[in-house]
Image (tube, rainbow, N blue to C red):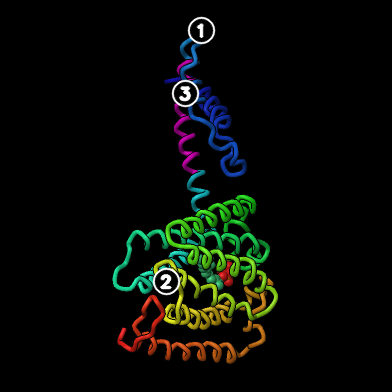
Protein backbone atom coordinates (compact mmCIF):
# COMPACT_ATOMS: atom_id res chain seq x y z
CA UNK A 1 0.00 0.00 0.00
CA UNK A 2 1.32 3.47 -0.88
CA UNK A 3 1.98 5.39 2.33
CA UNK A 4 2.50 8.76 0.75
CA UNK A 5 -1.29 9.21 0.29
CA UNK A 6 -1.88 11.60 3.19
CA UNK A 7 1.16 13.69 2.26
CA UNK A 8 0.01 13.79 -1.34
CA UNK A 9 -3.48 14.86 -0.35
CA UNK A 10 -2.28 17.71 1.85
CA UNK A 11 0.35 18.77 -0.69
CA UNK A 12 -2.37 18.72 -3.35
CA UNK A 13 -4.60 20.88 -1.19
CA UNK A 14 -1.77 23.38 -0.59
CA UNK A 15 -0.85 23.46 -4.26
CA UNK A 16 -4.45 23.76 -5.31
CA UNK A 17 -5.11 26.65 -2.99
CA UNK A 18 -1.97 28.39 -4.26
CA UNK A 19 -2.89 27.77 -7.87
CA UNK A 20 -6.56 28.43 -7.78
CA UNK A 21 -7.47 30.41 -4.71
CA UNK A 22 -11.20 30.46 -4.07
CA UNK A 23 -12.78 30.55 -7.49
CA UNK A 24 -16.11 31.83 -6.32
CA UNK A 25 -15.28 34.37 -3.65
CA UNK A 26 -11.90 35.51 -4.94
CA UNK A 27 -12.23 35.26 -8.69
CA UNK A 28 -9.17 37.40 -9.29
CA UNK A 29 -6.98 34.68 -7.80
CA UNK A 30 -8.94 31.90 -9.37
CA UNK A 31 -6.98 31.03 -12.47
CA UNK A 32 -3.24 31.19 -12.00
CA UNK A 33 -1.01 29.68 -14.65
CA UNK A 34 -0.82 25.91 -14.76
CA UNK A 35 3.01 26.07 -15.37
CA UNK A 36 3.44 26.70 -11.61
CA UNK A 37 2.00 23.23 -11.05
CA UNK A 38 4.27 21.81 -13.72
CA UNK A 39 7.26 23.48 -12.08
CA UNK A 40 6.30 21.95 -8.73
CA UNK A 41 5.94 18.63 -10.48
CA UNK A 42 9.36 18.72 -12.12
CA UNK A 43 11.39 20.47 -9.41
CA UNK A 44 14.64 18.59 -8.79
CA UNK A 45 15.10 17.18 -5.31
CA UNK A 46 17.85 15.43 -3.40
CA UNK A 47 15.54 13.83 -0.87
CA UNK A 48 14.23 10.26 -0.84
CA UNK A 49 11.95 9.03 -3.66
CA UNK A 50 8.83 8.73 -1.46
CA UNK A 51 8.27 12.49 -1.10
CA UNK A 52 9.06 12.89 -4.80
CA UNK A 53 6.36 10.38 -5.66
CA UNK A 54 4.05 12.04 -3.20
CA UNK A 55 4.68 15.47 -4.65
CA UNK A 56 4.33 14.24 -8.21
CA UNK A 57 1.04 12.61 -7.29
CA UNK A 58 0.00 15.74 -5.45
CA UNK A 59 0.84 17.88 -8.44
CA UNK A 60 -1.06 15.62 -10.75
CA UNK A 61 -4.07 15.70 -8.41
CA UNK A 62 -3.68 19.47 -8.22
CA UNK A 63 -3.52 19.83 -11.99
CA UNK A 64 -6.64 17.77 -12.51
CA UNK A 65 -8.53 19.43 -9.66
CA UNK A 66 -7.19 22.75 -10.89
CA UNK A 67 -8.61 22.05 -14.33
CA UNK A 68 -11.86 21.07 -12.65
CA UNK A 69 -11.89 24.30 -10.65
CA UNK A 70 -11.13 26.39 -13.72
CA UNK A 71 -14.03 24.74 -15.48
CA UNK A 72 -16.15 25.31 -12.35
CA UNK A 73 -15.30 29.00 -12.52
CA UNK A 74 -16.18 29.15 -16.19
CA UNK A 75 -19.43 27.29 -15.57
CA UNK A 76 -20.25 29.52 -12.60
CA UNK A 77 -19.77 32.81 -14.42
CA UNK A 78 -21.19 31.42 -17.63
CA UNK A 79 -24.44 30.63 -15.87
CA UNK A 80 -24.41 34.04 -14.12
CA UNK A 81 -23.97 35.83 -17.46
CA UNK A 82 -26.68 33.65 -19.00
CA UNK A 83 -29.14 34.52 -16.22
CA UNK A 84 -28.18 38.19 -16.06
CA UNK A 85 -28.72 38.44 -19.81
CA UNK A 86 -32.13 36.70 -19.50
CA UNK A 87 -30.85 34.72 -22.46
CA UNK A 88 -34.15 33.06 -23.38
CA UNK A 89 -36.04 36.37 -23.32
CA UNK A 90 -33.20 38.00 -25.28
CA UNK A 91 -33.40 35.19 -27.85
CA UNK A 92 -37.08 36.02 -28.37
CA UNK A 93 -36.15 39.68 -28.74
CA UNK A 94 -33.61 38.62 -31.38
CA UNK A 95 -36.31 36.63 -33.20
CA UNK A 96 -38.42 39.80 -33.51
CA UNK A 97 -35.41 41.80 -34.66
CA UNK A 98 -34.59 39.11 -37.24
CA UNK A 99 -38.21 39.17 -38.45
CA UNK A 100 -37.95 42.96 -38.85
CA UNK A 101 -34.73 42.52 -40.81
CA UNK A 102 -36.31 40.02 -43.20
CA UNK A 103 -39.39 42.21 -43.74
CA UNK A 104 -37.21 45.29 -44.26
CA UNK A 105 -35.00 43.50 -46.76
CA UNK A 106 -37.53 43.27 -49.56
CA UNK A 107 -36.97 40.36 -51.91
CA UNK A 108 -33.31 39.56 -51.14
CA UNK A 109 -32.15 38.89 -47.60
CA UNK A 110 -28.47 39.46 -46.83
CA UNK A 111 -27.79 36.47 -44.55
CA UNK A 112 -24.52 37.87 -43.17
CA UNK A 113 -26.27 41.17 -42.38
CA UNK A 114 -29.07 39.24 -40.68
CA UNK A 115 -26.54 37.34 -38.53
CA UNK A 116 -24.70 40.52 -37.54
CA UNK A 117 -27.97 42.23 -36.68
CA UNK A 118 -29.17 39.29 -34.57
CA UNK A 119 -25.83 39.06 -32.75
CA UNK A 120 -25.70 42.80 -32.08
CA UNK A 121 -29.30 42.81 -30.86
CA UNK A 122 -28.61 39.85 -28.58
CA UNK A 123 -25.62 41.61 -27.05
CA UNK A 124 -27.39 44.91 -26.43
CA UNK A 125 -30.47 43.12 -25.06
CA UNK A 126 -28.20 41.11 -22.73
CA UNK A 127 -26.64 44.34 -21.53
CA UNK A 128 -30.04 45.99 -20.96
CA UNK A 129 -31.30 42.99 -19.00
CA UNK A 130 -28.15 42.93 -16.87
CA UNK A 131 -28.39 46.65 -16.06
CA UNK A 132 -32.05 46.16 -15.11
CA UNK A 133 -30.97 43.57 -12.54
CA UNK A 134 -28.06 45.68 -11.30
CA UNK A 135 -30.55 48.46 -10.49
CA UNK A 136 -33.10 46.12 -8.89
CA UNK A 137 -30.99 43.99 -6.55
CA UNK A 138 -32.92 44.98 -3.41
CA UNK A 139 -36.30 44.66 -5.10
CA UNK A 140 -35.48 41.32 -6.69
CA UNK A 141 -34.32 40.03 -3.29
CA UNK A 142 -37.83 40.63 -1.89
CA UNK A 143 -39.69 38.79 -4.66
CA UNK A 144 -40.12 35.01 -4.78
CA UNK A 145 -39.90 35.04 -8.58
CA UNK A 146 -36.56 36.83 -8.67
CA UNK A 147 -34.76 36.25 -5.34
CA UNK A 148 -32.62 33.44 -6.77
CA UNK A 149 -31.17 35.59 -9.55
CA UNK A 150 -27.35 35.94 -9.56
CA UNK A 151 -27.22 39.38 -7.91
CA UNK A 152 -29.69 39.04 -5.01
CA UNK A 153 -28.38 35.55 -4.27
CA UNK A 154 -24.80 36.92 -4.13
CA UNK A 155 -23.43 34.68 -6.88
CA UNK A 156 -21.83 37.65 -8.64
CA UNK A 157 -20.94 41.15 -7.48
CA UNK A 158 -22.77 44.25 -8.79
CA UNK A 159 -19.46 45.65 -10.13
CA UNK A 160 -18.76 42.45 -12.06
CA UNK A 161 -22.31 42.47 -13.48
CA UNK A 162 -22.02 46.16 -14.44
CA UNK A 163 -18.73 45.42 -16.22
CA UNK A 164 -20.37 42.57 -18.12
CA UNK A 165 -23.24 44.90 -19.12
CA UNK A 166 -20.87 47.65 -20.25
CA UNK A 167 -18.66 45.31 -22.27
CA UNK A 168 -21.40 43.41 -24.03
CA UNK A 169 -23.53 46.52 -24.61
CA UNK A 170 -20.68 48.55 -26.09
CA UNK A 171 -19.53 45.65 -28.28
CA UNK A 172 -23.09 44.97 -29.50
CA UNK A 173 -23.72 48.62 -30.37
CA UNK A 174 -20.35 48.84 -32.16
CA UNK A 175 -21.14 45.67 -34.10
CA UNK A 176 -24.46 47.12 -35.25
CA UNK A 177 -22.80 50.43 -36.20
CA UNK A 178 -20.01 48.70 -38.18
CA UNK A 179 -21.92 45.86 -39.81
CA UNK A 180 -25.45 47.30 -40.12
CA UNK A 181 -25.78 51.07 -39.84
CA UNK A 182 -25.90 53.97 -37.38
CA UNK A 183 -29.70 54.00 -37.34
CA UNK A 184 -29.87 50.41 -36.10
CA UNK A 185 -27.08 51.03 -33.57
CA UNK A 186 -28.81 54.21 -32.38
CA UNK A 187 -32.14 52.42 -31.96
CA UNK A 188 -30.47 49.64 -29.97
CA UNK A 189 -28.61 52.08 -27.70
CA UNK A 190 -31.73 54.25 -27.21
CA UNK A 191 -33.76 51.19 -26.34
CA UNK A 192 -31.19 50.14 -23.77
CA UNK A 193 -31.41 53.61 -22.21
CA UNK A 194 -35.21 53.53 -22.28
CA UNK A 195 -35.28 50.13 -20.58
CA UNK A 196 -32.52 50.48 -18.01
CA UNK A 197 -32.72 54.17 -17.18
CA UNK A 198 -36.39 55.09 -17.73
CA UNK A 199 -38.56 51.97 -17.45
CA UNK A 200 -36.60 50.37 -14.61
CA UNK A 201 -36.82 53.31 -12.15
CA UNK A 202 -40.39 54.06 -13.31
CA UNK A 203 -41.49 50.61 -12.08
CA UNK A 204 -41.20 51.95 -8.54
CA UNK A 205 -42.83 55.30 -9.30
CA UNK A 206 -45.96 54.91 -11.44
CA UNK A 207 -48.09 52.18 -13.11
CA UNK A 208 -47.47 53.85 -16.48
CA UNK A 209 -44.24 51.81 -16.45
CA UNK A 210 -46.12 48.94 -18.14
CA UNK A 211 -46.79 51.02 -21.24
CA UNK A 212 -43.18 52.23 -21.38
CA UNK A 213 -42.02 48.61 -21.05
CA UNK A 214 -44.23 47.68 -24.01
CA UNK A 215 -42.46 50.32 -26.13
CA UNK A 216 -39.11 48.73 -25.19
CA UNK A 217 -40.33 45.33 -26.34
CA UNK A 218 -41.65 46.81 -29.59
CA UNK A 219 -38.43 48.50 -30.74
CA UNK A 220 -36.36 45.39 -31.76
CA UNK A 221 -38.30 44.62 -34.97
CA UNK A 222 -37.94 48.29 -35.93
CA UNK A 223 -34.22 47.97 -35.26
CA UNK A 224 -34.08 44.92 -37.52
CA UNK A 225 -35.95 46.71 -40.29
CA UNK A 226 -33.66 49.74 -39.94
CA UNK A 227 -30.59 47.48 -40.16
CA UNK A 228 -31.84 46.08 -43.47
CA UNK A 229 -33.39 49.16 -45.07
CA UNK A 230 -31.32 51.96 -43.47
CA UNK A 231 -34.57 53.82 -42.77
CA UNK A 232 -37.87 53.45 -40.99
CA UNK A 233 -41.27 53.97 -42.56
CA UNK A 234 -44.98 53.53 -41.85
CA UNK A 235 -44.75 49.90 -42.90
CA UNK A 236 -41.84 49.26 -40.58
CA UNK A 237 -44.15 50.16 -37.68
CA UNK A 238 -46.70 47.36 -38.22
CA UNK A 239 -44.79 44.59 -36.48
CA UNK A 240 -43.61 46.85 -33.63
CA UNK A 241 -47.19 48.04 -33.13
CA UNK A 242 -48.43 44.43 -32.99
CA UNK A 243 -45.77 43.61 -30.40
CA UNK A 244 -46.66 46.69 -28.38
CA UNK A 245 -50.34 45.80 -28.18
CA UNK A 246 -49.61 42.11 -27.60
CA UNK A 247 -47.33 42.83 -24.63
CA UNK A 248 -49.92 44.80 -22.67
CA UNK A 249 -52.24 41.85 -21.96
CA UNK A 250 -49.14 39.76 -21.27
CA UNK A 251 -47.77 42.21 -18.70
CA UNK A 252 -51.23 42.92 -17.24
CA UNK A 253 -51.83 39.21 -16.64
CA UNK A 254 -48.42 38.86 -14.96
CA UNK A 255 -48.93 41.97 -12.84
CA UNK A 256 -52.32 40.70 -11.71
CA UNK A 257 -51.36 37.09 -10.98
CA UNK A 258 -48.10 38.07 -9.23
CA UNK A 259 -49.44 41.23 -7.58
CA UNK A 260 -48.44 40.18 -4.04
CA UNK A 261 -44.91 39.57 -5.26
CA UNK A 262 -44.78 42.91 -7.11
CA UNK A 263 -46.12 44.65 -4.00
CA UNK A 264 -43.42 43.02 -1.86
CA UNK A 265 -40.80 44.10 -4.41
CA UNK A 266 -41.83 47.76 -4.06
CA UNK A 267 -43.27 48.20 -7.55
CA UNK A 268 -46.29 50.24 -8.66
CA UNK A 269 -48.66 48.28 -10.88
CA UNK A 270 -52.17 48.98 -12.14
CA UNK A 271 -53.38 45.71 -10.61
CA UNK A 272 -52.78 46.90 -7.02
CA UNK A 273 -55.81 49.17 -7.11
CA UNK A 274 -57.90 46.56 -8.89
CA UNK A 275 -58.90 43.76 -6.47
CA UNK A 276 -61.53 42.30 -8.79
CA UNK A 277 -59.21 42.32 -11.82
CA UNK A 278 -61.90 43.93 -13.99
CA UNK A 279 -59.87 47.00 -14.86
CA UNK A 280 -56.79 44.93 -15.68
CA UNK A 281 -58.91 42.63 -17.84
CA UNK A 282 -60.46 45.57 -19.69
CA UNK A 283 -57.06 47.10 -20.49
CA UNK A 284 -55.92 43.69 -21.75
CA UNK A 285 -58.99 43.18 -23.92
CA UNK A 286 -58.82 46.70 -25.35
CA UNK A 287 -55.23 46.17 -26.45
CA UNK A 288 -56.06 42.81 -27.99
CA UNK A 289 -58.74 44.55 -30.05
CA UNK A 290 -56.24 47.14 -31.27
CA UNK A 291 -54.38 44.30 -32.97
CA UNK A 292 -57.23 43.54 -35.38
CA UNK A 293 -56.73 46.49 -37.75
CA UNK A 294 -53.00 45.83 -37.72
CA UNK A 295 -53.65 42.41 -39.18
CA UNK A 296 -55.63 44.05 -41.97
CA UNK A 297 -52.82 46.51 -42.72
CA UNK A 298 -50.28 43.71 -42.91
CA UNK A 299 -52.60 41.70 -45.14
CA UNK A 300 -53.41 44.50 -47.54
CA UNK A 301 -50.14 46.36 -47.76
CA UNK A 302 -46.92 45.30 -49.34
CA UNK A 303 -44.31 46.09 -46.72
CA UNK A 304 -41.91 48.09 -48.90
CA UNK A 305 -38.72 48.96 -47.08
CA UNK A 306 -38.92 52.47 -48.57
CA UNK A 307 -42.23 53.11 -46.82
CA UNK A 308 -44.37 53.46 -49.90
CA UNK A 309 -47.72 51.86 -49.33
CA UNK A 310 -49.15 49.86 -52.21
CA UNK A 311 -52.36 48.01 -51.77
CA UNK A 312 -51.43 44.41 -52.42
CA UNK A 313 -51.73 41.29 -50.41
CA UNK A 314 -48.79 40.64 -48.15
C1 LIG B 1 -32.04 45.90 -28.20
C2 LIG B 1 -32.60 46.02 -26.86
C3 LIG B 1 -31.97 46.96 -25.92
C4 LIG B 1 -33.65 45.30 -26.54
C5 LIG B 1 -34.25 45.28 -25.17
C6 LIG B 1 -35.19 44.17 -25.10
C7 LIG B 1 -35.74 43.99 -23.73
C8 LIG B 1 -34.84 44.15 -22.56
C9 LIG B 1 -37.02 43.66 -23.61
C10 LIG B 1 -37.67 43.44 -22.29
C11 LIG B 1 -38.92 44.30 -22.13
C12 LIG B 1 -39.49 44.29 -20.75
C13 LIG B 1 -40.35 45.44 -20.40
C14 LIG B 1 -39.27 43.31 -19.86
C15 LIG B 1 -39.76 43.26 -18.47
O1 LIG B 1 -38.78 43.73 -17.58
P1 LIG B 1 -39.00 43.64 -16.01
O2 LIG B 1 -37.99 44.50 -15.33
O3 LIG B 1 -40.40 43.98 -15.67
O4 LIG B 1 -38.74 42.11 -15.72
P2 LIG B 1 -38.36 41.43 -14.34
O5 LIG B 1 -39.37 41.86 -13.32
O6 LIG B 1 -38.44 39.96 -14.65
O7 LIG B 1 -36.98 41.87 -14.00
Residue named by callout 1: 46
Q: Do the residues labelled 1 and 3 touch (CB within 8 Å)?
A: no
Residue 286 position within the rendered picture, expressed as x and y whole percent measured from the top left: 52, 91
User: Residues under labels 3 and 2: Cα distance?
Assistant: 54 Å
- Assign a secondary structure to mark 3: helix
Q: Front-most of 8 and 121? A: 121
Q: Is residue 173 magenta?
A: no
Q: Which of marks 1 and 3 is in front?
A: 3
Residue that appears at 37% across and 61% down: 113
The foreground one among 188 and 166 is 188
Task: Point out the tag, 3 or 2, that comes first from the N-terminus.
Answer: 3
Choose top left, top right, bottom left or bottom right for residue 30. top right
**Residue at which label 2 appears:** 225
- Mark 1 or mark 2: name the one nearer the start of the chain: 1
Q: Which of 288 and 8 is in front in this view?
A: 288
How crowded pointer 3 is (Cα within 10 Å; few <14, some 14-19, many 20+) is rated as: some
The location of residue 268, given as percent across then percent down, is: 67, 77
**Ligand 1 image position (quadrant):** bottom right
Task: List the residue tagged with mark 3.
Answer: 38
- Percent coordinates x, y for residue 32 in the rendering: 54, 32
Image position of 300 with respect to 269: above or below: below
Q: What stretch is highlighted in magenta?
A: 52-72
Query: What residue is rendered at 42% in x and 91% in y?
Result: 293
- Considering the whole magenta stretch, tell me its main secondary structure: helix
| Numbered disc in front, either 1 or 2 | 2
Question: Does residue 192 appear left or right of residue 2 in this picture?
Answer: right
Do labels 1 and 2 touch, CB within 8 Å?
no
Amino acid sequence: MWRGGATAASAARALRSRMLGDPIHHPSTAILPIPSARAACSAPSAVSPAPIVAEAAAASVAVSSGARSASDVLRHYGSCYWELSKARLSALVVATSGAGYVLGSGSIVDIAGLCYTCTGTMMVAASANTLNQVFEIKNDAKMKRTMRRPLPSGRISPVHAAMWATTVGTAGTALLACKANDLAAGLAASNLILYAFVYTPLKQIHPVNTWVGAVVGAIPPLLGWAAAASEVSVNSMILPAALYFWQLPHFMALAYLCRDDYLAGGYRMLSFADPTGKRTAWVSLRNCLYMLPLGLFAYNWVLHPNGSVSKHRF
